[in-house]
Amino acid sequence: MASIELTELLGGGSRPDLTDAELARLSDGFETASAASIIRWAVEEFGTRLALTASMTDGVLIDLATQVDPGIEVVFIDTGYHFPETLETVEAVRRRYGLNLRIMTVAPQERSLWEADPENCCSAVKVGQLDRALADKDAWMSGLRRAEAFTRAAAPIIGRDIRGLVKVNPLATWTDVDVRGYIADHDVPVNPLLERGYLSIGCMPCTRPVAPGEDPRAGRWSGSDKTECGLHG
Ligand code: SF4
C-alpha cells in the first residue's frame, strides 16, 4: 500500500495516540517513499512536538528537514567530549540553515567515567540529556541508517522508542552512496573528520578512524563489546 494511502487511512491531525500496529503499517508503507515525504508526514503529524536530533556527522537530514519546516527544533547533545571538528560542524550547519538549534550541555563528569564505565557515561551524558530534550515531545527524528552497521540493519522507518515516543528514521533505507550523492548535489556541510576515516563520529575518547572494509561503526568503543550509546533504544 502506498504511504499516502496509509496516511489517509489513519486520518490527519495530531495523533500522539498512534498504536504500535499503526506505526508498523506506516513504516512498511514508507519503505519506498522519499525521505522528504516521511519528514513531511512527521511534521504534519506532530508539529512543534517533533524534534530532530543531530550527531553532526553531516547535515543531510537537517538539509531535508528544514526544506519541509525551516523552524524545526534541532537538538545537539554537547557531551563535553566532542572533537573540535564536530563543534565546528555545529556552527557551520547553524550558519548555513539558520537553525532553531537547542544545544543540551552536560555538567562536567568524572574524567575517567568514560574509561571506567562507558555504559554509565553514555547513560548519564547522552541518554539523560536526550530524555530532557524530549520531555515535551511526542516524536523525534534521527539520521539513523540500516547500512551504518549490522546492529541497525533491521531498523524501522517509524517505530516507538523506550520512552513511548514515536521515532522516525527518514534515512533508514539510504545507502552510503545515496548519502554521498546528496551531499555532493546539495553542497551539504560535513564533518571534516569523515575525510580522515572517521565514518561514525562520536565522543573523542571513544572514537577512532576505521580501516578500509571495516564496519563504519567499528571505530566506536573499539576493543569493547559496546556498539551503541543507547540513544536509539
Ligand atoms: S561516547 Fe564515550 S565519552 Fe561519550 S558519553 Fe559515551 S562513554 Fe562517555
Image (cartoon, grey):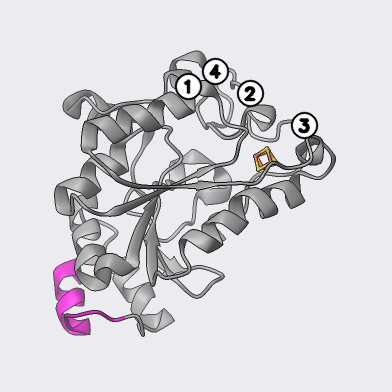
Q: In the image, what residue type sits under mark 2?
A: Arg
- Mark 4 is on which residue type? Pro
Residue at x 19% of width, y 75% of height: 7
Name the spot of residue 35 as percent of width and height, x first: 24, 51
Above or below residue 131? Residue 35 is above
Tell me the quadrant of ligand 1: top right
> Residue 190: percent from the left, percent from the top?
35, 26
Circle 3: is it few (<14), some (14-19), or many (20+) Cα within 10 Å? Answer: few
Query: What residue is disc 3 on?
Result: 223
> Do callouts 3 and 1 mark residues in contact (Cβ within 8 Å)?
no
Mark 4–mark 2 Cα distance, whole angstroms, equals: 13 Å
Q: Earlier in the sequence, mark 2 or mark 3?
A: 2
For this orientation, the residue located farthest to the top is 196
> Which residue is drawn at the image coordinates 50% and 50% (left, top)?
153
**Label 2 secondary element:** loop
Q: Which residues are magenta?
A: 1-15
Q: Is residue 42 left or right of residue 214?
A: left
Q: Check disc 3 and report its element: helix, strand or loop.
A: loop
The Cα atoms of the two marked residues, 1 and 2, are separated by 14 Å
Residue that numbered label 1 is attached to: 85
Q: Quadrant of the C terminus?
A: bottom right
Closest to the camera, between mark 4 and mark 3, is 3
Are circles 2 and 3 on residues that touch, CB within 8 Å?
Answer: no
Determine whether 155 is above or below 147 in the image: below
Q: For the residue marked with disc 1, what is the amino acid?
A: Glu
Q: Which residue is mark 4?
A: 212
Q: CA distance from mark 4 to mark 1?
A: 22 Å
Could you say which is closer to the camera, residue 203 or residue 149?
203
Gap in angstroms between the C-alphas marked 2 and 3:
11 Å
Please tell me how crowded label 1 is: few (under 14), some (14-19), or many (20+) other residues with Cα within 10 Å: some
